[in-house]
Image: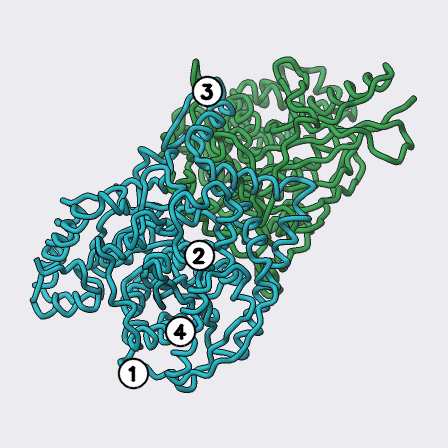
Chain colours: A cyan, B green
Amino acid sequence: MADLNKCTISELSEKLASGDCTSVDIVNDVLASIDANDGNVGAYLTIDREDALAQAKAADEKRVAGSSLPMLGIPVAIKDLLNVKGQPCTCSSKILEGYVAPYDATVISKLREAGAILLGRVNMDEFAMGSSTENAALGKTSNPWNLDHVPGGSSGGSAACVAADEAIASLGSDTGGSIRQPAAFCGCVGVKPTYGRVSRYGLTAFASSLDQIGPITKTVKDSAILLETLCGHDAMDSSSIEIEVPAFGKELSTDTSLAGMKLGLPKEFFVEGMDPEVEKSVRDAVEHCKSLGAEIVDVSLPNAKYAIAVYYIIATAEASANLARFDGIRYGMRVDGKDPADLYAKTRSAGFGQEVKRRIILGTYVLSSGYYDAYYKKAQKVRTLIRNDFTEAFKKCDAILAPVTPTPAYKKGEKTADPLKMYLDDILTTPTNLAGNCALSLPCGFASNGMPIGLQIIGDDFQEETILKVGHAYEQSTEWHKRHPSL
Amino acid sequence: MKYEATIGLETHVMQKTNTKMFCSCKYEYGAEPNTHVCPTCLGYPGALPVMNEKAIELICKAGLLLGCEINPYSKWDRKNYFYPDMAKNYQITQADEPLCLGGEVTVEVEGEMKTFTLERIHQEENAAKNTHVAGASLVDYNRAGTALMEIVSDPCMSSASDALAYMTHVKQVMQYGGISNCDQEKGQMRSDVNVSVKPVGQKELGAKVEIKNMNSFAFIQDAIEYEIDRQISVLESGGTVVQETRGYNPDRGETFTQRTKENAHDYRYFPEPDLMPVKVSKEQVEQWRSELPEMPAQRRVRYVEQLGLPEYDAGVLTASMDVSDWFEETMKHTKNAKAVSNFIMGEMLRLLSEQGLSIADSKVTPQKLAEIIALIDAKAISTGGGKQIFETIFNEGGDPAAIMEAKGLAQVSDDSALEGWADEAIANNPKPVEEYKAGNPASINFLMGQVMKASRGKANPGAVMQMLKQKLDA
Ligand SMILES: [Zn+2]
């Protein structure tokens, strides 16, 4: 076995181009790895082997016919909240059991056009509400680096399958850190693009003003290649922005110099209670960037400390409306009742999990008559302050360096009893969602217990190129990304 | 004690757009249920709304026609409520920043000119149609998400006649402006009515009762009258009127409680994150203003000044845009405006109402009416013959000249035939002859009638008159 499943997108593209392997070979290796390991990892919810192999065969035929599409023949795992025509799309919720998507999300159409193989659907926290994938109703996912630990969330399956070499790359979505945090917990690279960069059409909404789809990959270069495929204006999404998409992949050179680059360090992001090993790894990474020629400057994001409070008002408010459509009338689960209200209550009581119910109730409360001004309206004002902080910071630097999470991946069950404790884990990732700008997470070390640690590189609006460049330079001059978990 | 009523209307009008408000599905009345649907209007996971630009143009034009200010910056909100007619369980609407602000209309109510002011017009999406059958409820989402605007008046009316005059005017403006067909049978125009009653002279308004979702003007009128009486009798018997939402039962002619204030919905409005705010530039507004079509008042003036029609005729012809358009189409084929007007006001409207048809269904086309009028003007047929031809075509179809031949309606102007009938009439009716000669010119009409009778209506009346005068004056 050539272990093609362990390769990166760029390595496989070369092998495919030179005829060293076929897409069918890659898919076979990936399927073998799933067979061997997914019983333990539990990344996948559904996988259609025949369909994956048929897509691979078609990709190989296209290549013979002369096609050289950027993602041709590369298998990508899909977070279970993206609609793929003819496939289930459960969002790991019982309420969507039986639903079959009647259409392709825009990113799925783009993947198809780029020649990618849609491999299977991976697990997540129910409706993307969670930070450990423990809120999943339809599967249990473990961290490939230590099966007793959580993979992070909500894109836990997307990160775990890439870390376990059960996919070459995957798509996740990031509402408050749901790509960056699991990428950090699993030792992968993940990008949350600028809001409006990637179409949300076909992404089952959690919080519409915060959600963005992005890649989870093994290297920064792979993220660049996959991100380029996903980006672009979409008339089907009014929040998608008409702006040129740079050739992210091609921009990354072998030159790892960061000379002339100013990198900001926000003191507020080294929070109290932060794991000392995380802090050390991140500070070492900052020093490393300095050694590559970057100038390190102090920046301040004074309102970032309110991000969790603001996030849990805005995200839950939007979610309370977004999830209202799951009512048992048109698709998914239905528990009959004596009248519509009874049917709704029974269906939603049986269909939604604890955390989803908690957030719907919270969101409903903050929008209620008499509370709107005190919560929702005030949260929007603070959101503007957080955004202004970033605008100020980016006057002083090209990108910001920070930890992704206060701790490495923790053990399963450690935080499930205390939702507030779990919410606080998002403290370093939510500010970017609220401000709308982009950020990248990549490995920068390992804790003494062997769990990966992530470095966050935060960029200004539409400055994905900059954060990819910094990330690539760091990655290519370090060895962290070369480690694989032993499964 | 004397009481007075305060009435405000919320009128929902379905705009004439090709596609729905936030997706590209078509709307077609009476189509097979659930055939014009997509992930967006069915509220499928992940589907997103995209604003219909044409609807924005139409609501702004409606606003300009009703004297509103066009809001340069308006936004979308979600109105949350659970009901099977709303696929997402929230409706996209405009809460605090609607597209059109203010506005006023001046209309005649029972001979008096009154001005009614508007609060706003906002854009929203229509609900699906629910049908209840034995043991089940069926939902047709064809109508779900179609463009619907809500015209909100101030509480500025005081009687059912005010409300009727206001709605009639709004409907006319919507039709003439090309905003909506306002076909009430098809639910394209529906109103909610707010009614409150207070002692005359009291400043603060009484408790507001909302009567929901009525489409017929007659029902709205009845419901308002019933509700005013009901509230007055509650007050007179020492009770208090409860603020609530009521429905109207047209069979019983009564309103009934639907939802009290305690059970009122909290709609939890908040800004719709899936749509960007709408910005309308001054230049755009001026462009739309310059494209506004002629309104009924302007048409009336034109009919009087340019076509020489009486005010009354102009009023009748412009009351409905279908009729007015039909009149204008006929005028492309004839110059005789008064004859066209007479036929429309007489035969056409009578036959349409007798048979419950609309003018679009008439087998008499504008060209055919013009041909009938041409035959009359050429004296080939009498006006009466023309009416017969009109009615025949209206009922059976056909060609005016052919019907004239077939029914033998061609007029006789031949002197020898006329002379025979005239002599006969004079000989048989000495008394009117005497009276005429004694200086009573009206008596000639009796003789004229005798000639027409003898000719079975075929004699040319002008020629008959001339002939009789010649003989009697000789
Ligand atoms: Zn549709």
Residue mark closest to the camera, 4 vs 3: 4
Type of amino acid at the residue the image marks with label 3: Gly
The residue under label 4 is A285
Count of picture labels = 4
Q: Is residue B28 above or below residue A389?
A: above
The residue under label 1 is A255
Q: Residues within 10 Å of mark 3 (few under 14, many from 20)?
A: few
Type of amino acid at the residue the image marks with label 4: Ala
A21 or B143: which is nearer to us? A21
- Specify whether A48 is left or right of A442: left
- Specify whether A225 is left or right of B215: left
Disc number placed over residue A337 in the picture, else none: 3
- The answer to whether mark 1 and mark 3 are in CB contact below 8 A is no
Spatial CA span between label 2 and label 4: 20 Å
Which callout, 1 or 2, points at the residue further toward the start of the chain?
A: 2
Q: Which of the chains bears the disc numbered 2?
A: A
Which callout, 2 or 4, points at the residue further toward the start of the chain?
A: 2
Quadrant of the image occupied by residue B137:
top left
Q: Are marks 2 and 3 on the same chain?
A: yes
Which callout, 4 or 3, points at the residue further toward the start of the chain?
A: 4
Q: Are marks 4 and 3 on the same chain?
A: yes
Which callout, 2 or 3, points at the residue further toward the start of the chain?
A: 2
Residue mark closest to the camera, 2 vs 3: 2
The residue under label 2 is A177
Residue, x 79% and y 40% (percent of image)? Answer: B113
Spatial CA span between label 1 and label 3: 65 Å
Q: Is residue B113 above or below residue A271?
A: above
